[in-house]
Image: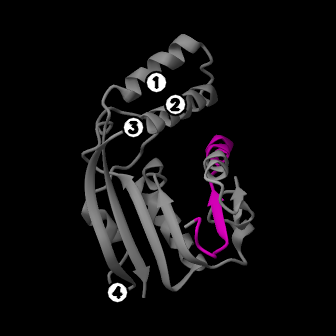
Amino acid sequence: MLNSKFELYAIDEEEFQIEYLKKRVNDMEFNIERVNYSTEKFPSNSFNNHTFAGIILSNILHFLDFNQIKEFINNLKSYITNDTVIVIVVHSWKHYTNKKNTSSFKHYFKKNDFYKLFAKSEYEYLYFSETEAVDNDDSNNFVKEWVKQVKIQEGITNPKQIEIAQRSYLNNKRHNSMTLVIKRK
């Protein structure tokens, strides 16, 4: 995408995520003037004059419960047109954190959930996969920093407690996810 001629928007409510992405884009030496970074909530009035040819929802939706996901998807419709491509990556119900009573993840997806959210009469299903992956060092470092930021937001600043939380989260390095690519009809 960075090689494309499109204007890009990177949106995350967490400043840490945006700063991490800025560094990655900068390290790749791409034309970063085309990337707009925002910590605004999306969808929201801040983006009312925009429609998007493509939207990537990567590791976002599983932070919401299913009713919140339905509302999010419904609100997303005002930002897309016919032929908008949407890529979705979420935690599968097979993900190792499922049934661990984690406060961060509120919904683990089954394939049928997508049909409830994206009616086949409105969307063309282009691709679906369910994968199990082992994280690499870069991913592990990112997750460690993410866990640290979450713990700080929760008021936990003791380095030992943060380290224990990081080790606990990374204890099982297999992540089950689902990827869906759809196009609005």
Q: Position of residue 1 (x, y in %)?
A: 55, 67
Please state if 140 lies on the left or on the right of 146 as rendered.
Answer: left
Q: Are marks 2 and 3 in contact (CB under 8 Å)?
A: no
Residue under label 4, please give it.
121
The disc placed on residue 147 is 2
Q: Earlier in the sequence, mark 4 or mark 1?
A: 4
Quarter-wise, where is residue 157 in the image? top right
> Residue at label 1?
166
Residue 111 image point, x, y percent: 26, 63
Vertical position of residue 54 compared to residue 31: above or below: below
Residue in the image at 69% along x and 63% along y = 31
Between discs 2 and 1, the one toward the N terminus: 2
Q: Given this view, does label 4 or label 1 mark the residue nearer the observer?
A: 1
Specify whether residue 9 is painted magenta: yes
Residue type at mark 3 is Asn
Label 3: how many residues lie within 10 Å, few (<14), some (14-19) or many (20+)? few
| Label 2 Cα neighbours within 10 Å, binned few <14 / some 14-19 / many ≥20 | some
Gap in angstroms between the C-alphas marked 2 and 4? 40 Å
